Image (cartoon, grey):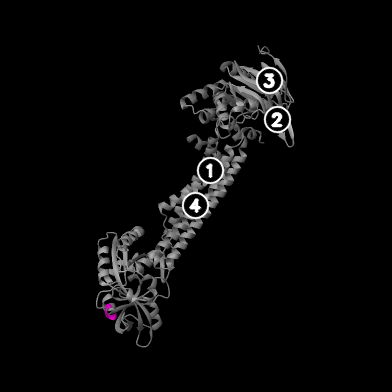
């Protein structure tokens, strides 16, 4: 095998310029894919982090059917005391959970005593909520980063639109489950920037205030937001939760709860998927580059060495060995391209990171680009290049191995 | 002992609609250790015959036995194995592998065809390098040596597997007369030392005289036999 590699390397060195050009082409492809993957992965992770850490949490538990009607914030689909107890028991014993937060979600009218508009409100236990969505307070653009009873975080949209400032008193009017209307005055504690861009109408009040406004006699919760210790365990955790809670059936024998990962709760998941799809297509382009360039080089190599192939076949080299010779040549070309591309790609990513390039997402500006190359990405891209190189060499190598020595020796 | 036996061996080629009879039912026998030349003008069938003996092609008719094996019964892989074990080739254009040194070219059949252990390989290659007078050039590449030296390397490569038979198709065609004579003398010397059968084709009358047995081919017929018996050089 060592000798096959030696012959392959020497044959590649025989046509230095061609080898250099092909290896460069492959390297450029690898550099491009690595850099693109590193940057998009960074952007995707930042986007997911922003959405989950400042709003959604990683996983949410609701009463069955709640998510389908989530736009209406249906109070009749809130979790009741018995169900809350059951969920909290399950959450308490799960060691993968870092924090969880019960929320009461409801819609209401927001008034500054002169104008009125709609608002979507989240009744939260501030301590639990801030532990579950640690970047929520980072969204407070003005005011204090704490929330006490009788206080409200209002969205920047309402603050700007209605001229409400931190410290102002506003009124929230809402309709409870029975249809009766109730109102309560709040002091604006902070102005919240939207996590997902302009248009957010979500405000936050203390969970006790929410219960008072909605005249809840017993404990009710619209959803549980959960934060995991390790985001990488999202799917296994979700599966585990579904399994644990799916056994809970109502009187009609149907499941009481539903569990969703963040992906099912925001359209931004589709953007994340689009980024993944774009990365995939960029990888496909790399495959095409490698496939075409290696195949071209190997076809030329076989054509130029027909008499040599005839000679080695005549002196008894078996077809399998001739096949291996050309496959290894393609393999070496792929390895060279992958190594150079990986080294330069990593270097470019390093330069990008030390350059501290900033960009904006949603209402936030000044995010520093932290491009990340995962070892798994390097392995996948390199392995793809190398495997494709061998595949691209297969046809020319097969042709060489099947060549009749007598015809090959006659070739001029 | 008979090494090559041809019985009514014929070879046809299709050239468009025409069938060309390259060899017409020829018969001959070659003994082991012979130093034989097939002579004749271009297109007489010399190369075709050498290709058949070398298992690079199959006869259209008749039976051709080499080293006791009916070569027309061998498939592609069996032919390759048979060649790798029993037949050494010397080509008109030397056909050395350009990316390998002189040493590596000679070593190639032992390494890539016969899988001989390293120590044995080195011993055999060095012995042949000395025998063909190329020891000092062992590290050079084919494009760094002369035509005569290339053919010496090709002879060493053909002999390194200890073949029963060496086939040389016009081995002196690309060499000047003096070098051609030296190459033929070297082949003869190797035959004497190693007792290997040499068969070569040529249309150079000055080289023909070096052969001990001469077969003349014309238009696919084996027309005459001239048995020199090696007396010319004796």
Label 1 marks which chain's residue? A
Q: Which residue is mark 1?
A: A330
Where residue B144 appears, x then y in whole percent? 59, 31
Report if residue A45 is visible in the image: yes
Disc 4 versus disc 1: nearer the observer: 1
Disc 4 versus disc 3: nearer the observer: 3
Report if residue A17 is visible in the image: no
Q: Which residue is mark 2?
A: B12
Dot 3 or dot 2: first in sequence order is 2
Disc 2 versus disc 1: nearer the observer: 2
Label 2 marks which chain's residue? B
Mark 3 to mark 2 CA distance (whole Å): 16 Å
Same subunit, tags 2 and 1: no
Q: Which residues are magenta?
A: A211-215
Q: Nearer the viewer, residue A294 or B206?
A: A294
Where residue B71 appears, x then y in whole percent? 60, 26
């Amino acid at each position: 095998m060592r000798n096959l590699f030696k012959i392959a390397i020497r044959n590649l060195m025989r046509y230095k310029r061609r080898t250099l050009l092909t290896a460069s082409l492959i390297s450029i492809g690898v550099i491009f894919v690595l850099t693109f993957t590193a940057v998009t992965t960074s952007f995707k992770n930042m986007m997911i982090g922003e959405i989950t850490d400042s709003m959604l949490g990683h996983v949410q538990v609701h009463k069955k059917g709640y998510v389908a009607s989530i736009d209406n914030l249906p109070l009749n689909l809130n979790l009741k005391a018995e169900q809350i107890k059951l969920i909290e028991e399950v959450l308490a014993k799960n060691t993968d959970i870092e924090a969880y937060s019960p929320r009461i979600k409801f819609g209401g009218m927001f008034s500054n005593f002169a104008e009125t508009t709609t608002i979507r409100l989240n009744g939260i236990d501030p301590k639990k909520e801030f532990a579950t969505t640690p970047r929520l307070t980072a969204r407070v653009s003005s005011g204090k980063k704490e929330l006490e009873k009788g206080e409200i975080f209002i969205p920047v949209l309402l603050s700007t639109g209605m001229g409400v400032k931190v410290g102002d008193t506003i009124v929230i009017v809402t309709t409870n489950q029975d249809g009766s209307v109730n109102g309560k005055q709040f002091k604006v504690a902070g102005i919240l920037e939207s996590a997902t861009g302009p248009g957010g109408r979500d405000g936050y009040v203390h969970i006790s205030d929410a219960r008072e406004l909605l005249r809840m006699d017993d404990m009710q919760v619209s959803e549980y937001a959960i934060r995991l210790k390790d985001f990488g365990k999202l799917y296994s955790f979700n599966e585990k939760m579904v399994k644990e809670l799916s056994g809970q059936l109502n009187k009609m024998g149907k499941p009481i709860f539903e569990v969703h990962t963040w992906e099912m709760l925001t359209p931004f998941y589709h953007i994340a998927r689009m980024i993944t799809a774009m990365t995939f297509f960029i990888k496909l382009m790399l495959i095409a580059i490698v496939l075409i360039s290696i195949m071209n080089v190997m076809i030329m190599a076989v054509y130029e060495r027909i008499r040599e192939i005839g000679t080695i076949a005549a002196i008894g080299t078996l077809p399998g060995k001739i096949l291996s010779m050309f496959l290894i040549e393609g393999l070496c070309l792929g390895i060279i391209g992958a190594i150079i591309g990986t080294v330069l790609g990593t270097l470019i990513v390093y330069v990008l990171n030390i350059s501290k390039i900033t960009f904006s997402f949603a209402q936030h500006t000044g995010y520093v680009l932290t491009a990340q190359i995962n070892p798994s990405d390097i392995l996948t891209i390199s392995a793809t290049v190398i495997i494709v190189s061998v595949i691209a060499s297969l046809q020319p190598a097969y042709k060489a191995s099947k060549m009749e020595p007598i015809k090959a020796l006659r070739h001029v | 002992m008979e090494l090559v036996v041809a019985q009514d061996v014929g070879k046809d080629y299709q050239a468009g609609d025409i069938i060309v009879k390259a060899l017409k039912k020829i018969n001959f026998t070659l003994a082991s250790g012979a130093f034989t030349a097939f002579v004749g003008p271009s297109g007489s069938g010399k190369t075709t015959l050498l290709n058949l003996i070398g298992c690079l092609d199959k006869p259209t008719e008749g039976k051709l036995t080499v080293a006791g094996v009916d070569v027309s019964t061998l498939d592609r892989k069996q032919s390759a194995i048979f060649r790798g074990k029993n037949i050494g080739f010397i080509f008109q254009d030397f056909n050395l592998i350009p990316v390998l040194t002189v040493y590596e070219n000679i070593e190639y059949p032992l390494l890539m065809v016969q899988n001989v252990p390293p120590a044995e390989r080195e011993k055999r290659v060095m012995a042949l390098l000395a025998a063909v007078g190329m020891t000092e050039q062992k590290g050079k590449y084919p494009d760094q040596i002369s035509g005569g030296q290339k053919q010496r390397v090709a002879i060493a490569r053909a002999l390194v597997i200890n073949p029963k038979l060496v086939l040389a198709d016009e081995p002196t065609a690309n060499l000047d007369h003096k070098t051609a004579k030296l190459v033929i003398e070297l082949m003869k010397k190797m035959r004497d030392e190693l007792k290997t059968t040499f068969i070569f084709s040529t249309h150079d009358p000055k080289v023909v005289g070096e052969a001990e047995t001469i077969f003349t081919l014309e238009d696919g017929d084996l027309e005459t036999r001239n048995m020199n018996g090696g007396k010319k050089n004796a």
